[in-house]
């Protein structure tokens, strides 16, 4: 059975009549709305956000024409930023990883089981360690050495491998800094997992920082990568309890579970077009 | 500042055009939609549920006329069950209680602080113990003795006190069975807190049952009361961890916290018209 | 580095002097206690439970002699049931599975990463589906067809494969009933994962049952298997929130995450000798 | 029934024989151990921590003599810091508060219900707002105006009211800075509730900070107050989920629930002598 749903994401200045305009347009063209969620941010001058899913089976125009008509009839009058995607068009996900396998394997598993509306098309690592694990899933693995000094070459090589061939980059515990120039190639399309409850414990070795501060709860944060380290829009977070009994290693073990779950959710939501970024924050439709 | 919002709750057979019909109607009459949530139950022949909040300040008709027009133009063609309420019309909540004060006090506090869009109008108890606590909130307290044998008289007396004077009955650890006849007077308008994670541990002394079974998590459940004991539509549940170290009394202590939180949420949601009951289940809009 | 720790598990009637007797005995023989947890069940005539970890490096007797001395000097006077194991003696874990891979793979992963103080020695399945996945971990996979009618033959074949070759059996979503006779071969050494928050939703298709009841939270339960279905001592449970938006399939997806986490924890604790079964309940030392 | 339990808290350099020494001493003197928990911090040169509860009914010496004997026989040889308290000696708790009542009322409730092993002896506020609420519990309320400029006078007045008359100070949303000099009078005996998941969002208006950062989870932290603002040893934390739908006010509402629960737990544990402070961290026995 082909998935004939389309997803419409919209953000625009809030004013009366938006829902009526969108829903009447879709109804007029034979598109049956099956899911509809909206949000209005009150304290920023009023921005309206919405996500719709609708059936395309009985639309009265080819999709491209429907898009053109929507742009003219609805999007323009309401000054909308919008995006219309077909559920059947699966995104291509590339994963950057170093030596830790937990976050990567969780993604590969989720994908292999059919729970990810996307395809893992490539894994790049600055180490060789995970080659066999990755290739056993039938996914290409490319070793691109990277380090503080080799960064420009490494990033040039990765850009070559990725540009035009991936829709989303996932840093699944990639232990290298990515340059602002590299980030700029993938605006709002790089997701990182940070192993703390941001904004606590920015930077290196957050479990050690958490241990030293004596917190009773640790966390993990998935966020879009921006030029500033660990400061991009947060997509998802989760936490787990710890106690004085837990060593730094115990925090790392617990944290692995948090990291892989949080990252898998964030990637899944991105691939299902559930996220709108606004300023430095995300709207995540459920 | 008067709250000029109205809330519309709708359920009807699913079919194309519902969103367009509702939103166009409201737009045409000057009602600005500020919140809109919907749900479609796929596996029961397709039922459409929605909750809208809209501003009534600039509507072009008196509210009663708007209702009549909605009935004719939208509700009838789509065979809708619906309800339109003004946020400013606060519901009157009566609480039935025995000797435990935690769930009752939580409601009184929430109300006193202005966090409940409703008024606690009366507390009825089969014991005198909580009179002073209740009256210190300025809420009338009536003692109606009740027991297995005195049930008919007790319920007649309560009906007299309540009929036409309360919109919602809350059983905040009311340790008496209520008869099917009494329940029938208040369809979908009695909320009970059961001190277990239903459907586990139906009936008496659920913490003892939980202790004896050796569970590692206990819970509390708020549900609408129906003729069958502890079997009505669940509104909200929450849980907490326990261990072999916890005695039955420890479970009760922990449980009190769960009970009062779960009940307060359920009552709040009911009073904000966030709940639609369908069959033996609830749709709870966030 | 060899792990030179030993773990002592004790249960006995409570009375004064137990801690002093155990700790003095160990001190006298050069065994340095590094972890010590105890519990007293007050309401069953008083049973004392304890778990100790101690270093064996400087003990003044061979381990077998130390055991004999402990039996005579301490265990006998206090009527103790006890067990002394070396952390370095890894248990052999056999897994029974049908077609679902999530709980099995989580165990294999945990083991491969070195987070399980045990070895997965064998996987038996009544289907061929998971052979490749299992063998890629270097673990033997044996196909033993099973069904209501073939049960005696299947269980005889499994007993042959397992007796004397496994210390723990894990039913990682093994969709077959095991007979009381089979269970009796492995007292307190079979762990099952049930896909509900027991005792709610005993039996078949618990996610469907949960969906039909309209619960707001679902769970998973790891327990020791006894002759009565889904009624054995609970080791661990966990839960996750659901809403009216979730279909039966959504519950299954969410549930998979709960199942694999809960089962992995229970197996880990069993393998680290953290669990004492008493009556139909467990004491789980942290 | 008088509570005849005593609680012993110990911290000392780790070395073999501590458990044997303590438990033999107590056994010798007729003290029956009913709860025993210990912890060894591995990475700070090895510090041993323990908490014991024992029955004093059959001890063979007056308590003061038992203390003297313990000091000589056990504490001195092992260089212990220790504290022995009777469960029946209830601590006197004074609460400092401004205008928010939720954290204060939770404490008063918990106390009134008999769930706090302590007495609330005094409430001091820099505002008059909560006088009636406090006095309805039969607790004295004293208004001590405070502000940046009046701090020295305010703190002198409070010291006069408190010195020798309270064992624990609780800052239940006291919106004034306390000076290092004031803090120094109450080492490890002032508990504050900070309305964020520390160390995130130190300082003023943490809910606004959390909202602006777009976090998906907010928290509250109870900690001992030290000279450095919001940097003292953390006792307890808890968190709750938020989403893009939540305004700053929503975060504050949710946060109130977290704050009162977290603070009540921390105060309860302190009053039950469950906490040992070591460096800037806490060991909290369960």
Image: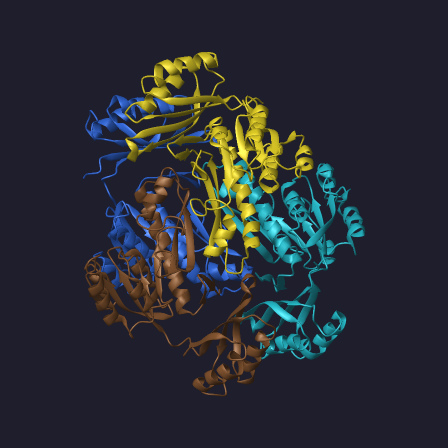
Chain colours: A brown, B cyan, C blue, D yellow
Image height of A200 relative to D173, above or below? below
* Residue sitting nearer the eye, D274 or A270: A270
Q: In which quarter of the image is the N terminus of chain A?
A: bottom left
- Asked where in the image residue B80 lies, by quadrant, the reply is bottom right
Is residue A142 shown left or right of residue A84? left
- Asked where in the image residue B209 lies, by quadrant, the reply is top right
Image height of C279 relative to D253, above or below? above
Is residue C207 shown left or right of residue C161? right
Rendering coords of residue C29 (x, y %): 24, 23
- Asked where in the image residue D84 lies, by quadrant, the reply is top left
Rendering coords of residue A254 (x, y %): 35, 48
Image height of D84 relative to C116, above or below? above
Rendering coords of residue D76 (x, y %): 34, 17
Rendering coords of residue C77 (x, y %): 35, 22
Is residue A284 shown left or right of residue D41? right
* Residue sitting nearer the eye, C190 or A51: A51
* x 65%, y 61%: residue: B273
Is residue D241 visible to us here?
no
* Residue sitting nearer the eye, D102 or B210: D102
């Amino acid at each position: 059975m082909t998935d004939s749903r389309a997803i419409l994401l919209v953000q625009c200045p809030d004013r009366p009549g938006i829902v009526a305009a969108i829903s009447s347009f879709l109804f007029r063209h034979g598109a049956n709305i099956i899911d509809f969620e909206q949000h209005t941010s009150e304290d920023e001058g009023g921005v309206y956000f919405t996500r719709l899913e609708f059936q395309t089976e009985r639309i009265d125009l080819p999709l491209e024409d429907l898009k053109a008509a929507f742009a003219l009839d609805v999007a323009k009058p309401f000054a909308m930023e919008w995006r219309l995607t077909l559920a059947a068009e699966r995104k291509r996900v590339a994963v950057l990883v170093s030596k830790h396998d937990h976050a990567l394997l969780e993604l590969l598993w989720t994908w292999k089981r059919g729970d990810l509306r996307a395809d893992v098309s490539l894994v790049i690592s600055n180490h060789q360690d995970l080659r066999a694990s990755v290739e056993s899933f039938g996914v290409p693995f490319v070793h691109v050495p990277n380090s503080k000094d080799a960064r420009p070459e490494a990033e040039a090589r990765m850009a070559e491998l990725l540009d035009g061939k991936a829709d989303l980059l996932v840093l699944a515990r990639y232990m290298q800094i990515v340059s602002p120039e590299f980030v700029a190639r993938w605006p709002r399309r790089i997701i990182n997992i940070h192993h703390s409850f941001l904004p606590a414990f920015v930077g290196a070795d957050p479990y050690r920082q958490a241990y030293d501060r004596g917190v009773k709860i640790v966390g993990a944060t998935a966020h879009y990568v921006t030029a500033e380290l660990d400061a991009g829009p947060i997509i998802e977070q989760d936490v787990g309890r710890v106690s004085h009994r837990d060593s730094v290693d115990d925090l790392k073990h617990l944290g692995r579970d948090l990291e892989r779950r949080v990252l898998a959710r964030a990637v899944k939501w991105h691939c299902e077009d559930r996220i709108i970024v606004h300023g430095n924050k995300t709207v995540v439709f459920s």
